Amino acid sequence: MLQVRAGDAAAFEELVVRYQGRLLTVLEHLVGNREQAEDLAQETFLRVFKARERYQPEAKFCTWLFTIANNVASNSLRSRSRRKEVGVPDKANTDTSSFGLDQMALAASSLMPARLIDKAEAAEVVRQALESLGERQKMALLLSKFEGMSYQDIAEAMDMSVQATKSLLSRARVNLQRILAPYMEEGTRPASDGVELGTEAATSAAGQDAGLEDES
Amino acid sequence: MNHQDPTLPAIDPVEEELVAYLDEELEPEHRARVEHRLAADPCYRDKLRHMQKSWDMLDLLARSEPDEGFTRTTVAMVALKAREATDVQKESTQRFGLLFRVGVVVSTLACGLIAYSIGSWLLSVSDRQLVRELPLIEHLDEYKHAESVAFLKSLEGLFGQHYRQAAADAESVAFLRSMEEQGLFVLESGEDAEPATAPRNRETDEQRRDRLQRMTPEQKGAIFERQQRFAALSLPDQERLRALAQEIDADPQGDKLKQVLTNYHEWLKSLGAKDQSEVLAAPVDQRILKIKEVQNRQATKRLKTVALELSSQDMSAITDWLDLYVSGHLAEFGRLTPSQFRAALDKLPVKERIDRHRRGIAWRLGRKELLPQPTQQELDALVSVLSPKAQVVLEETESREQEWQYVQELIHQVQQSKRYPRLSDEDLRKFAATLKPEQREALENKTADEMKNALHDLYYSQKASPSGGFFPWPAGTFGPPAR
């Protein structure tokens, strides 16, 4: 990053290569759409480049990158929800669920062995469960799971206190567990509509997420 | 701001504690207390188990794999935006200057007709300047990468008249050659070929003005955009480019230099962001070396592709040529054979000796001290019987040594293909269907090429040892098939 700060283009490319997969993974699961995740990842890298001179070497680059990514994603999700309010259909969500259904259809066909069907089905259930969490719970969960970030780093990346992060993650994991419980215990596959997923847990997850704005 | 919405359910302290325990965020003392309770309380333990299980299920979520284009477009997009930002900054400085000048002109206009005339004259000057500098503005990006006439002259060997033929995509050149062979048309030779760009310096101002007026709105927009970029350059840079354009125009080899300029620019554009920045960042006196280095890498890549896709005709041609080459250098082959084998080989009839040396050439490849150097005539004879696709790759070599090195790569590939013939996609698909689930799982995240190569290796490894064997490569070799 120090080379990037000095304006080294090759170092910037290396940085993109090194972090693009990780960034895309978090963003794709956050917004539920590959194309949008790529746009957000590019916007994040652009902001990294623009802000390179402000980077402090003592700060962890990874935390700094995901701080920017969180801001970019939050702005995008906020404007997306604003568009939804005025009646524009949410194409991203439509795409994701149709992708999921395609996967499930493929899984159910004889083209895949039983082990893979189970795996594909479980992955789809987890994806839907994640989808039903609020954006902030989802982000905290993804940073913890995929990036292995500490509460301190997540707090920094999401601009909140460590205690609020602890509560946010706690709620996220408890909600996730409640949503997945019927599937884990009885193998009951929830319907593809996220709202029907462990109804109580799913709706409370979204509500709690909004309430956490006040906690931080 | 640490209050909580009263409508939200309170966080269960036990759950929060367990989550922090799983996240390894508890202080050692607290952690010990949790572990103690876990050991004693089955209900507490059960809660933890469920939480851990749902957490583990997140591992099923796929990791995103960016495709090759993503890096390139991201880096290119950032480079473009960064340049735009610089241009806008410069432009706003200039706009301020322009506003100031306009202010002066407006107040001058208020003074009367004389000032109006001065304003009109200024405008026509700017118009005349665009007409005069049109070739430079049109090819701004090309000129920006040309350091000097001397630099362009040093690039002539790499990007001169033969550049297109040498570096163009082997497939399309091969196609053109085959069309020529069928007598459908004759390829133009370097001397007679029409230059890729019109002779820009031979246009008069009047002709340029006409051309400018005939341009479509899109073309005019592009010229305007380049003119803005040119104006955003510092004055010394503008002057340098003007002087360079004039110097090229005045040079007796001007048209050739412009061709070099265009070819060099096209080549730069075709590079990945990393190679491009490496070339442009190299000091001028080392840039030629850097360009050669990148071109060599490109040539090696093309050679590998051609070698992997050799046709059966090319393979037979190379095998036949090997016979002639070995017989022509039989005495030298004998001399370069280690003494412990030489005596036994010398006793064999000539034909068999030739055959042995040809079959045993694999261990000599790449080792100058063991392999006789073929003559240029011998190499030319091989090139003349190969397919146009393979010819193109061999013709772009710079020396006999390099050509021989490339031929050795082709020989190596022919020998590999005999031992491990490439399987068709259909055969690979059939073979994949016979794999065990865990073997298939290991292939799931590979790209198409990686998967084909891995399937290939697996196929030959199983063929050599149907049980799967300990070694992943065929028995009797010292490693997996090289590629």
Image (tube, rainbow, N blue to C red):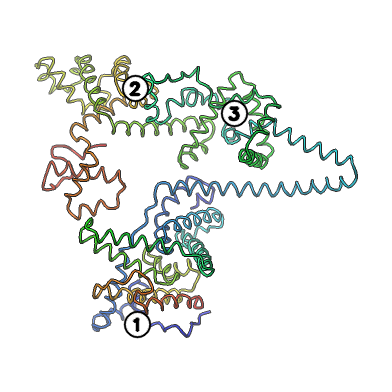
CB contact under 8 Å: marks 2 and 1:
no
Q: Residue at x 34, y 62 (%)?
A: A100
Q: Quadrant of the rendered structure where residue B297 is?
A: top left
Badge 3 amino acid: Ser
Residue B250 coordinates in the image, percent (x, y): 64, 21
| Chain at numbered mark 1 | B
CB contact under 8 Å: marks 1 and 3:
no
Label 3: which secondary element: loop
Camera-side residue of B397 and B441: B441
Badge 3 or badge 2: first in the primary sequence? 3
Q: Judge the density around disc 1: few (<14), some (14-19), many (≥20) Cα neighbours within 10 Å.
A: few
Badge 2 amino acid: Glu
Q: Which numbered tag is attached to residue A113?
A: none
Camera-side residue of A64 and B392: B392
Query: Image height check: is B225 above or below A60?
Result: above
Q: Give left or right: position of B467 versus B405.
A: left
Q: Which numbered tag is attached to residue B14?
A: 1
Q: Which residue is mark 3?
A: B148
* CA gap, disc 3 and disc 2: 33 Å
Residue B53 coordinates in the image, percent (x, y): 28, 71
* Residue at the limit of the structure toward the bottom, as seen here: B6
| Chain at numbered mark 2 | B
| Chain at numbered mark 3 | B
Residue B249 coordinates in the image, percent (x, y): 63, 24
Q: Give left or right: position of B349 versus A165.
A: left
Q: Which numbered tag is attached to residue B401?
A: 2
Badge 1 or badge 3: first in the primary sequence? 1
* CA gap, disc 2 and disc 1: 75 Å
Query: Image height check: is A20 above or below B405?
Result: below
Residue B114 coordinates in the image, percent (x, y): 89, 39
Q: Quadrant of the rendered structure where residue B118 is?
A: top right
